[in-house]
Image (tube, rainbow, N blue to C red):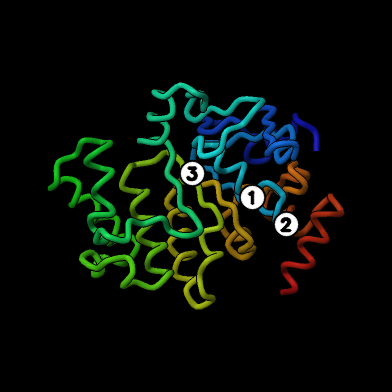
Amino acid sequence: MNKSNANKTKSGGAGELIVEISNLNKWFGSFHVLKDINLVVGKGERIVICGPSGSGKSTLIRCINKLEEYQEGLIKVDNIPVDDNVKNIAAIRSGKVGMVFQHFNLFPHLKVLDNLTIAQKLVLHRDQNEAKEVAMNYLTRVRIADQANKFPGQLSGGQQQRVAIARSLCMNPQVMLFDEPTSALDPEMISEVLDVMVELAEGGMTMVCVTHEMGFARKVADCICFMDKGQIVEKNTAKKFFEEAQNERTRLFLSQIISH
């Protein structure tokens, strides 16, 4: 697809931009993993990134909060460059971007409540009472408040992922990044996590989500990007993506993943 199309949001609408990715290139050694990526995310927009394994999806989303270095191009979050400036990265991670990983990344030696309050106190400088109040609010929102005094190892995978979502929300992010949040879960636990994500989307949270859950994508995505071999080869509204996919590689992917 051409770069002018890649830079449009919500079928061409502008609006307030939260994430801007321009001419992004990244290599792992000699392997060119991201090739001339151009993407913008507007406030309140929900973008789903899908594609085959090894297409660069997770690498792209990890570049947004500098968990991965990139060699060429520019990323901005709320107009702050994602670069080597330590203050910029601190600002982005402390209130601009929240991230939910495949494998939860909770502190196993801390109780659920402490997992949610530690960053609030250290980064946002909230006192214990305020941090606890915020944590319990979000644990209630993800329907897991009764697990606050347990350790992560005492919870199911689905419960741990909901704790991880609540932890990110405690930092009041402007955009939530999800990196295949259900891929490590047993099938019966996937729906409880997706239900929480749907509620966030319906509440207006800006989201960029790498996932193979096409039912979720069809339900909540404003736009879907399909990646293959390090490039965004198709970007469209959810309806057009599923019903009028233009790229042959996209159609093949959809036929394979939906048939399963």
Residue sitting nearer the eye, 96 or 150: 150
Residue, disc 1: 49
Residue at the far bottom in the pictured view:
188
State if disc 3 and disc 2 touch (CB < 8 Å): no
SS for callout 3: strand
How far across and how far down the image is residue 81, in percent? 51, 23
Element under disc 2: loop
- Quarter location, residue 121: top left
| Residue beneath disc 2 | 52
Question: Distance from label 1 to label 3 (Cα)?
Answer: 14 Å
Mark sitting on residue 206: 3
Which is more N-terminal, label 3 or label 2?
Answer: 2
Marks 1 and 3, the one that precedes in the sequence: 1
Side (left or right) of 200 relative to 232: left
Residue at the image position 45 percent from the left and 21 percent from the top = 85
Rendered image: mark on residue 143: none
Q: How many marks?
A: 3
